[in-house]
Every structure is written in structure tokens, then in C-alpha cells.
Amino acid sequence: MKRLFSTARRDLVNEGAVGRYLKYAVGEILLVVIGILIALQINNWNENRLDRKKELEYLGSMISDLQADARSIDWAVQGNTHLISELNELLSLLSQPSEDSAYQRDVFIRQLVYTYWYLTTEFSELTMSQLKSSADLRLIRDPDVRNAMLNYEQGLDRCRLLYSMLEGYWHVLEARQKRVFNLGLGKPLYEHIEENYLTILEPLEAMESLVPEGQYLLDDDLKMLALFYNDLLFYRTTMSNVVLFLKQQKQLAASLEQLIRDKYHIMRDSR
């Protein structure tokens, strides 16, 4: 083709047909420009196709993260709700302190089991981390979906903050326990729970035999139980807030998943 244009230009110049030469020159330039535009269009189309493919891959991964979060939240909410119920029972007992040995044994065992630990939630943040670290968040074209994803991430931050507060109150409660209770009597029970901390969700009766008889309080002054009550109340209240926020986060997960499916016409797996 290049050879053809060169020959045509030479012939036209030799014949003195300047006007015709200019037409050929302009035509040649137009063809080059059109070729470049077509190549750019094809390149843009291909890049857009790859971006849309990557966008759908990210959204599919985000849906998987949301479903995993929902399962983890359900597990944590169920377990912590059980613990909150038992902590309420313990608070009720502490509100009416007694020197009775059976009463103090009941309080001792309950505080060992139900303040041992709480259930945490591992959030799946791989997709959002990839989107932000690679600056690919721009690939999420729909602004409603993009904003909902960012809002969901902020919700995760709030849940983590509450868990951090809960751990802080747990440490305060732990320090108080060491000043109120003769924790040495709880060693066999602690060792039993350490083998599987989910034991704290099992019936209390199965663990009572692991605690020997003895002096359960370090001080006969029942006012110490009142101080333990105050610390336990803050701990229980914060755990209740954790559960509340986890439930809200699960609702955000369900809403975000549905929004993604609606906006991008992604069907649910029929399996």
C-alpha cells in the first residue's frame, strides 16, 4: 500500500498535477488518521471489556465475602447472646449478695465460665483490600454500589472498635476477679475450658464437678462483690452493644449483596 501511494505521488508530480497530488496526500493522511482512530477504538473497547470482566470478578468476590461475614456474624451473635443471658443471671445473683456457701459457689463457677472469653468475628476484607490497594475501586461503575461498599467497610470499623472496647472491659473485669475470688480453686475448670473455649456455651452443670469445695472469696466483705458487679455490668452492656452492631452489619451485608445483584443482574446460585 505504501509503495502504491509513493508511485502515485511520483507520477502526479511528474505530470505537474499538483491539485491531484494534494488530493492524494490528503486522502493518504485521512486514511492514516482513520486507521489510528479505529485502532484506538478497538483498544478502548478491549480495555473496557477487560475492565467490565474485572469489575464482575470483584463483585462476585465481594458477594462471597458478604456471605462469609453473615455466617461468622450469626455464629458470634448466637454465642454472645447466650453469654449475655448467663451474665444477666450472674448480675441478678450479685445484686443480692449472701454469705451462704452454696450461693458463693454458684457465683464463683458462673464468673469463671461466662467471663472466660467472648465470641469474636473474623470479617472477610480481601476484596475491599484489593480494590483499594490497586486503585481498582474506580472499576465499580455504579455509584450506589460503590458507596454501599464503602459504607459497609465503615460498619466493619465500628464493629472492630466495639470489640476493642469489649476487650478493654474484659481486662478490667479480669483484674477485679483476681482481687475478689480465690481463682486457684478454678484451675481444673480453666484447664478444661482451655482445651476448647466453646465449652463456655455448654450447660453449666457439666462443669460444676470440676470446681472443688473451698473458700471462694478472698475477702469476707461482700462489698467486694458489689465492685465486681459494677465491672461486670459495663462488660455485659458492651457485649450487648457488640451484638447489636453485628446484627446491623449483617443487615448491611444482605442489603449490599442484593443491591449488587439488582444493579448487575447477578443471579443467585441455584445449588
Image (spheres, grey):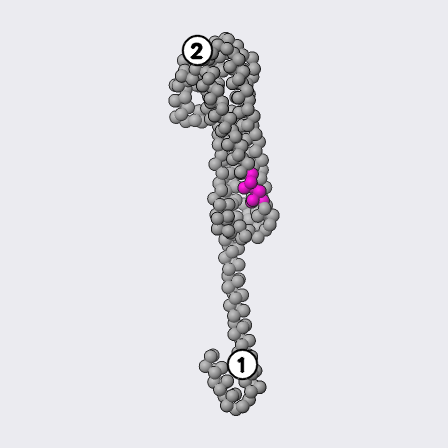
Coordinates of residue 191 in the picture (x, y in percent): 39, 22
136 in magenta: no
Find the residue positioned furthest to the top.
Answer: 100
**Distance (Cα) linking label 1 and label 2:** 106 Å
Find the residue positioned furthest to the right.
Answer: 144
Q: Nearer the viewer, residue 174 or 32?
A: 174
Q: Would you call the spot at circle 1 few (<14 residues within 10 Å), some (14-19), or many (20 or more)? A: some
Region rendered in magenta: 148-155
Q: Secondary structure at mark 2?
A: loop
Q: Quadrant of residue 150?
A: top right
Q: Which residue is mark 1?
A: 25
Residue 264 marker: none
> Is 241 located above or below residue 123 in the figure?
above
Coordinates of residue 85 in the picture (x, y in percent): 54, 23
> Is 40 located above or below residue 80 in the figure?
below
> Is 14 located above or below residue 234 in the figure?
below
Picture residue at 54% right of the left edge, 69% below the top: 37
Picture residue at 49% right of the left edge, 29% below the top: 167
151 in magenta: yes
Q: Would you call the spot at circle 2 few (<14 residues within 10 Å), some (14-19), or many (20 or more)? A: some
Residue 215 marker: 2
Q: Which residue type carries mark 1? A: Ala
Q: Secondary structure at mark 1?
A: helix
Can residue 87 be seen by looking at this rendering? Answer: no
Q: Quadrant of residue 148?
A: top right
Q: Does the residue at mark 1 contact the one at mark 2 (Cβ under 8 Å)?
A: no
Picture residue at 48% right of the left edge, 51% below the top: 134
In terms of secondary structure, what is the magenta stretch mainly? helix
Can residue 238 be seen by looking at this rendering? Answer: yes
> Is 239 located above or below residue 187 in the figure?
below
Q: Which residue type carries mark 2? A: Gln
Picture residue at 52% right of the left edge, 11% below the top: 222
